[in-house]
Amino acid sequence: SAISGRLFAFLERHFNRHIRSVQP
């Protein structure tokens, strides 16, 4: 559903930010 897609995109962005912050 649309909500599921939006939630997944939000989590992906959040995790991506964390991973980028951890990696050099």
Image (tube, rainbow, N blue to C red):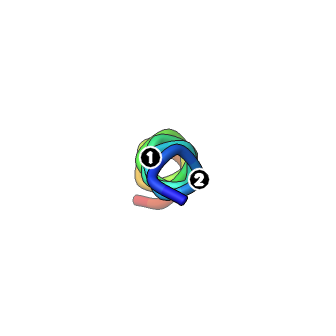
Residue 16 x %, y % = 45, 54
Is 13 situated above or below 5?
above
Q: Secondary structure at mark 2?
A: helix
Farthest residue, direction front:
1
Residue 5 x %, y % = 48, 57
Q: Which mark is residue 22?
A: none
Residue in front for this viewpoint, 11 or 24: 11
Residue 17 x %, y % = 42, 43
- Pointer 1: residues within 10 angstroms few (<14), some, or many (20+)? few
Label 1 sits on what residue type? Arg
Q: Quadrant of the N terminus?
A: bottom right
Is 13 situated above or below 1?
above
Question: What residue is at 52 percent from the left and 44 percent from the top?
Answer: 3
Q: Secondary structure at mark 1?
A: helix
Give the labeled residue for mark 1: 6
Residue 7 x %, y % = 55, 43
Residue in front for this viewpoint, 5 or 14: 5
Residue in front for this viewpoint, 7 or 17: 7
Question: What residue is at 40 percent from the left and 59 percent from the top?
Answer: 24
Label 2 sits on what residue type? Ser
Question: What residue is at 59 percent from the left and 53 percent from the top?
Answer: 4
Q: Badges 1 and 2: C-beta atoms under 8 Å apart?
A: yes
Give the labeled residue for mark 2: 4
Q: Is residue 21 visible?
A: no
Q: How many marks?
A: 2
Is residue 17 shown left or right of residue 19? left
Residue in front for this viewpoint, 6 or 16: 6
Question: What residue is at 45 percent from the left and 53 percent from the top?
Answer: 2
Q: Is residue 20 visible?
A: yes
